[in-house]
Image: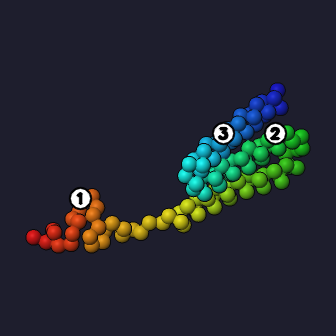
Amino acid sequence: MHTALNNLIGGSLIAGYLLAGLFFFKFWKSSRDTLFVLFAAAFWILAGQRLLLTLSTDKLEDQTHLYVLRLLAYLLILAAILNKNRRSKPSRLRGAGPGDSFAGGASEPGEDDV
């Protein structure tokens, strides 16, 4: 019973990881943003790791090498987030310079000087 339940949960997780990977891959195809393709790859690595873990008959102590794949996937997610933040860091003062309009503000310098 214990093995059957582990296989059921493992299969559900594999399906979820594969579906999440396809979800991110779909967004990558339309946007070509590397964040999405890296997320897709990370979720597919997690699916592969879970498949190997589910099919493994080794004792828990002998499955340590499989968790390196999970670490790799999490590092890939972290690298994708850091890369996205590094590439698209907007200036804090954007839109506040002379001649720039922003919500509720003047579009020309000196308009509020009355």
Give the quarter of the image for residue 98.
Answer: bottom left
Number of marks in the image?
A: 3
Question: Which mark sits nearer the N-terminus, 2 or 3?
Answer: 3
Q: Residues within 10 Å of mark 3 (few under 14, many from 20)?
A: some
Amino acid beneath label 1: Gly
Mark 1, secondary structure of its residue: loop
Horizontal arrangement in the rendering, residue 87 relative to residue 94 (left or right): right
* Picture colour scheme: rainbow
Mark sitting on residue 54: 2
> Label 2 is placed on what type of residue?
Thr
Left or right, 99 with respect to 6, comes to left
Q: According to the image, label 1 marks what residue?
A: 104
Q: Earlier in the sequence, mark 3 or mark 1?
A: 3
Quadrant including the N terminus: top right
Where does the C terminus fall, quadrant-wise?
bottom left
Name the residue at 69% across, 51% down. 41
Q: Is residue 45 visible?
A: yes
Instruction: State the image coordinates of residue 56 (x, y, percent, origin top left).
Output: 87, 42
